[in-house]
Image (tube, helix red, strand yellow):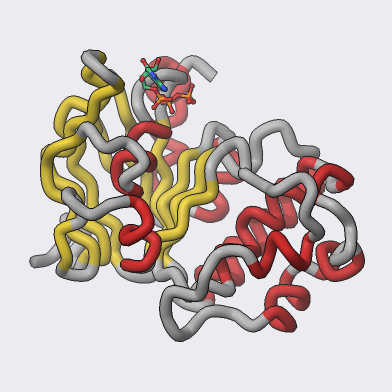
Amino acid sequence: MTSEHGKKPLLSVRDLHAWYGESHALHGVNLDVAEGETVTLLGRNGVGKTTTLRAIMGIIRKRKGTIDFAGQDLIHTPLHRTAHAGLGFVPEERGIFATLSVDENLLLPPVVSDGGMSIDEIFELFPNLKERRNSQGTKLSGGEQQMLAIARMLRTGVKLLLLDEPTEGLAPVIVERIGEVLATLKARGMTILLVEQNFRFASRVADRFYLMEHGQITASFPAAELEQRMEELHEVIGV
Ligand SMILES: Nc1ncnc2c1ncn2[C@@H]1O[C@H](COP(=O)(O)OP(=O)(O)OP(=O)(O)O)[C@@H](O)[C@H]1O
């Protein structure tokens, strides 16, 4: 199987539906992410971007459709197995353990496969985390917490990172750093599916975009088309 842009997808989602109780949040999402690609989901608040990441990851159990990841259908796979299959989710709230140190937070997620980064490599990529390795989670700034939330996934050997609004609420200089980190990960072959409202940031890191409306994907376009679609996107997204 090849995706719409000709490369074999690592992740292929077809007709994905998800529910919160009786509330039907995803209405047949279709998307592909090729190996090594960075893809960004855009859309207004509440259209289902976070829900898409959570449904792929298996955090939302009430779901149906197909989630093919490296040839394996994950639709009936429980959350802890999804992580073991090679998916790493960095939620918007980051999930740093407040009473644990940077080192302890880093070592918490289990290694799921070969090819992850060593602690030394991680500290090379995040020198400020190295400086703060004995600090408690609560003592970290928002930017440091975001870095740590990404960093601790890199040791585990995951092949696909799902990042939910990694730049939200962060100062421009930190956003810049996160952009550099994602570029380094991309150069190392990491595949990334990103939810992002910051167009400027997203245009620097993404190869391709999907637009979501009402729990469905309504457009797909390469990064090169972002500029010419800006007006339309501002209208749809309202930012
Ligand atoms: N835990 C929940 N329980 C019930 N409904 C929820 C829950 N989380 C989200 N929803 C609803 O599901 C729909 C999709 O929400 P989702 O958070 O995926 O949107 P989003 O596009 O990521 O927007 P945002 O940027 O605001 O998170 C919304 O109508 C939202 O109100």
Q: Residue furthest left?
A: 1
Q: Is residue 223 in sight in this rendering?
A: no
Q: Nearer the viewer, residue 130 or 135?
A: 135
> Residue 58: x and y, percent?
31, 45
Residue drawn at x 77%, y 41% as measured from the top left: 142
Q: Is residue 167 in sight in this rendering?
A: yes
Residue drawn at x 50%, y 48% as measured from the top left: 163
> Residue 6: x and y, percent?
18, 65
Quarter of the image for the N terminus: give it. Answer: bottom left
The image quarter containing residue 183 is: bottom right
Q: Nearer the viewer, residue 4 or 102?
A: 102
> Residue 164: x and y, percent?
51, 41
Residue drawn at x 65%, y 63% as measured from the top left: 151
236 w.r.t. 10: above or below: above
Relative to 73, is 60 on the left or the right? right
Relative to 75, is 132 on the left or the right? right
The image quarter containing residue 2 is: bottom left
Relative to 202, is 97 on the left or the right? right
Quarter of the image for the C terminus: give it. Answer: top right
Task: Give the number of callouts.
Answer: 0
The picture quadrant for ligand 1 comes to: top left
Residue drawn at x 25%, y 14% as measured from the top left: 23
Q: Nearer the viewer, residue 84 or 235?
A: 84
158 w.r.t. 76: above or below: below
98 w.r.t. 102: above or below: above
> Residue 80: x and y, percent?
37, 57
222 w.r.t. 188: above or below: above
